[in-house]
Image: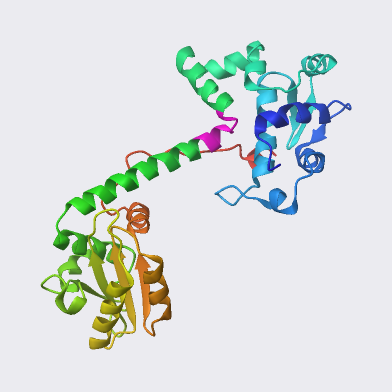
Amino acid sequence: MGVPDFQTLMLPVLKTAAGGGEVRIGDVVDQLADVFALTDEERAQLLPSGRQTTFANRVHWAKSYLNKAGLVEMTRRAHFRITPEGRNVLTAPPEKITIRFLEQFPSFKGFRDADVGATEAAEVVLSVAESALTPDEVMRQAHLRIEASLAEEILQRVRSGTPAFFEKTVVRLLITMGYGGSVTELDKALVGKSGDDGVDGIIDQDPLGLDRVYVQAKRYADGNTVGAGAIRDFFGSLNLFKATKGLFVTTSAFTASARETADRLGTRIVLIDGIQLAKLMIRHEVGCRIEETLHIKRVDEDFFE
């Protein structure tokens, strides 16, 4: 079945508060996990932040939306209770409480329209209602889509550059990741003429250069995959340098035989394909920069103790 979405949880959350008196949100999470027969894995599934389980997060959002509609009210830290309006809903409950259902309550409409224009607010609510995701999950999915589009554009830009530019980009990325000193030593890490002895860059792993990583960078078009032969050639080049570590980076992809060959050879060779390269460039801000930062904040319960 999977972890239910937060709109599916709104009616069950309201029902758990119908017994009278206040209820503790943590107890509601446990009760509903049993009601929905969640597996141990589903109960333990964490948000990307690692600070809260997905199920608990969705129960909290369900409670929050019920509160905005005036169906439950907060009593003290981590506790809430049903309101008379909430009890009225349960006298003839809908099959499911959704955001569209909550729009009939003036307090929810006021919450929805606060701080933004009515048209923009309606679009936001409609987006959440149709996706069945919590607002923070909507933001995370949008972030993933933005990064996927950015990764594709970065890869296209790298493929359209010269081989020398690609080699320089790879070495710059490694230096930014903490290998080989500072960016001012970028040219020092490159091996003169492109492809000298099958090696495009040499990165020191320590300040004294006692341990080194030898880099091969292949700028290939999408679909022009790197095969096992190229890996064996790189392995031969590493032997000439008596190297123990190699990094083979491409803008395309590696065939299955290429990966098998890299695993079998005596020298440690790490393969980075175009998708991995773009993700690393985004993570370490090589070829891109932060345009805007959005912070997701939550109430500091300790403050209100």
Front-lying residue, 270 or 113: 270
* Dominant secondary structure of the residues highlighted in magenta in the image: helix
**In the image, farthest residue toward the right:** 19
Q: Which residues are magenta?
A: 131-138
Q: Is residue 39 left or right of residue 281?
A: right
Front-lying residue, 302 or 155: 155
Asked whether residue 132 is drawn in magenta, I would say yes
**Vertical order, 158 against 37 (above or below):** below
Picture quarter with the N terminus: top right
Spot occupied by residue 126 in the image (x, y as percentages of width and height) = 53, 21
Front-lying residue, 199 or 32: 199
Q: Is residue 186 left or right of residue 299?
A: left
Q: Is residue 216 left or right of residue 298?
A: left
Asked whether residue 120 is drawn in magenta, I would say no
Spot occupied by residue 193 in the image (x, y as percentages of width and height) = 10, 72
- Residue at 35 percent across and 42 percent down: it is 149
Spot occupied by residue 283 in the image (x, y as percentages of width and height) = 37, 54
Spot occupied by residue 52 in the image (x, y as percentages of width and height) = 64, 47
- Residue at 34 percent across and 64 percent down: it is 177
Q: Which corner quadrant of the image does residue 96 belong to?
A: top right
Residue 288 visible from this viewpoint: no
- Residue at 54 percent across and 36 percent down: it is 136
Q: Which corner quadrant of the image does residue 7 belong to?
A: top right
- Residue at 69 percent across and 24 percent down: it is 67
Picture quarter with the C terminus: top right
**In the image, farthest residue toward the left:** 193
